[in-house]
Amino acid sequence: MKIEEINALLEDIDLNGQPPSEEPARQYYYLKKCRRYVEAEEKKLGRKLTACVTTFGCQMNARDSEKLSGILEQAGYVLTDSEEADFDIYNTCTVRDNADQRVYGRLGHLNSLKKKNPHMKVALCGCMMQEPGTIEKIRKSYRFVDLVFGTHNIFKFAELLASVFEQKAMIVDIWEGTDKIVEDLPVERKYPFKSGINIMFGCNNFCSYCIVPYVRGRERSRSPKDIIREIEALAADGVVEIMLLGQNVNSYGKNLEEPMSFAGLLREVEKIEGIERIRFMTSHPKDLSDELIEVMASSKKICRHLHLPLQSGSTRILQAMNRRYTKEQYLALVEKIRAAIPDIALTTDIIVGFPGETPEDVEETIDVIKKVRFDNAFTFIYSKRTGTPAAAMENQVSEDVVKEGFDKVLRTVQETAREQVKRLSGLTLEALVEEVNEQDPSLVTGRLSNNTLVHFPGDPSLIGKIVSVYLKEYKGFYFLGEMAGGVPECQKA
C-alpha cells in the first residue's frame, strides 16, 4: 500500500470510536493513535523521533523487520541505523545459542543508553521471545525493556506500540500459537527493486535439533490469490526480483482449502509482468518434487540457485536428526536436479557435532561435499537448544572432537566451492545491480542468477537494473568484471 493510500485510510479513522475487531483495520486504528503520541512527544522534545530496528537471524526475520520498520515510519519515526535512537527494537533469532547470547550482551548496551535518554523505548520480539524461560529472564534482569512480543502476533505491532505510550510497566504479549495470517500492513523495504514475500509460516518437520516449530508454530500457507496480488503491487512499484519465503517452501499449500503445490504457485508467479527474477528458500530435500524440478528447468525467471540443506552426510545421523532422507537419497536428488538444470548453483547447511556423531560420520559428510561440489555452504557447530529432542540425547560430542571435524568440513567446503564457482570465469552473465561497492565507490555490486556476487565499474544509476557483465577475474567466492553491452532499452529510465 502506497503512502498516499495509507494517509487517506488513516484520515477516515475516528479515534473517538471503538477500535475495529477485524484485522488489519484494527491495526490502522492504533497506527493513527501512535501518530498522535509521536507528534506529542516531538513537540515536547522539539525534534523528530528516531527508531532503529536490529535484525538477528534468517530471511524470514529480515522480512518481519521490514514490517516493523513500515509501522514505525508510518507512526512518524525517522528510521536510523544508530542504536542511540528514541525507539530500539531487536528482532531476535534463537536457532543457535550464540544468537541468544548476542542479544543479551547488546541489551546491556541499550540499558546504558536508556539511562542517558530516559524517554527512550526498548522492544524485543521474534523467535527468542517464544523460547521457554526467556520472558522470566527478561522480567528479572532487563526490567528497562518496555515491550516484549513473539512471532505469532507481529501484525499487532501498532497496537502494542500504542500501549507502550499509554503504560509505564513492561508489556509482554506472547502467543503460544495462532492460525492467523494478517498482511496488508505498511512495509518499509530495504531495497526498492527487490523484496521478500512470505508465502507460508511455521514448520511441521520437527528435526530433532531444531527449535523453529516450537517458536514459529505449525505450517500455515497464505492464499495464492493474496500472494499474487501482493507481488503484482510490488511489480507495479518497481520491484524486479522477489524471494518467496517459508521455513519449508516445498510444503506450501498443503493446508489450503483448495491445495496448491509450490510448483503450481511458481507457475502463477512467473506470469506476473515486471517480475524478472524469482528466488525462494528454504527447500527441504524430502519434499522437493519432480514437478518443482521441471518448473525450475523450464523457467526463464526462476534463478539458477537452490539452497538444499544437507545437515549431515551420514545416514545414521540423518535418522537421529529426523531428516527423513538418506545420504543416498540426497545424492540421487542432486543428480536429478543437475541433469535437468546443468547450470544450477547448489548451496547447503551443514551441522557438525550432533550428538553421537563420530569421525566416521564426519567423513561421510565430507564425501557428500566432494560428490555434490556445493557452490557454498553454511557450516555450523551443533548448538543445544533446550526443549528439542537432541538436547536430551546422550553422547554429546566433546568440544575438541567437534572442532577437529568442523575444521575438516569447512576446509573441504572452501576447496570444492572455489573450484565450482571459478568455472564461471570468462563468461558473460546477467547481474542485478544492488548497490555501490562499500570498499570502492567507483564499482557497483551485482548478483548473478546463481547468487554469486560480481563487482564492476559503474555508477548509482545502474542500481536496480539487470545488466550483462563479463566475469573477468575470479577472486574467491566473487568476481571482478566489466559491463558488457550496456543497459537493456526496456530498463532505461
Image (cartoon, rainbow, N blue to C red):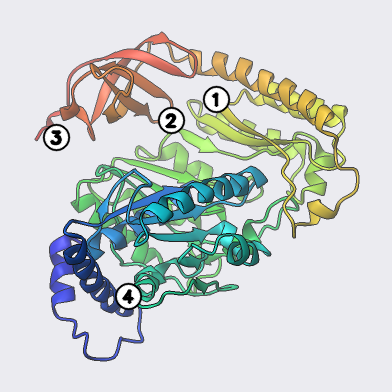
How far is mark 2 from mark 3, CA to CA?
A: 23 Å
Q: Are marks 2 and 1 in contact (CB under 8 Å)?
A: yes
In the picture, which quadrant includes the N terminus?
Answer: bottom left
Q: Earlier in the sequence, mark 4 or mark 3?
A: 4
Give coordinates of residue 304: x percent, y percent: 44, 33
Q: Are marks 2 and 4 in contact (CB under 8 Å)?
A: no
Residue shown at 55% from the left, 31% from the top = 346
Q: Earlier in the sequence, mark 2 or mark 3?
A: 2
Residue at numbered disc 2? 451
Q: Amino acid at mark 3?
A: Cys
Residue situated in front as seen by the camera: 44 or 29? 44
How far is mark 4 from mark 3, CA to CA?
A: 39 Å
How far is mark 2 from mark 1, CA to CA?
A: 9 Å
Task: Label 2, secondary structure: give it.
Answer: loop
Circle 1: is it few (<14), some (14-19), or many (20+) Cα within 10 Å?
A: many
Residue at numbered disc 4? 27
Residue at numbered disc 3? 490
Relative to 404, residue 30 above or below = below
- Residue 70 vs residue 149: left or right? left
Q: Quadrant of residue 434?
A: top left
Relative to 358, residue 180 above or below = below
- In this rendering, the label closer to the viewer, 2 or 3: 2
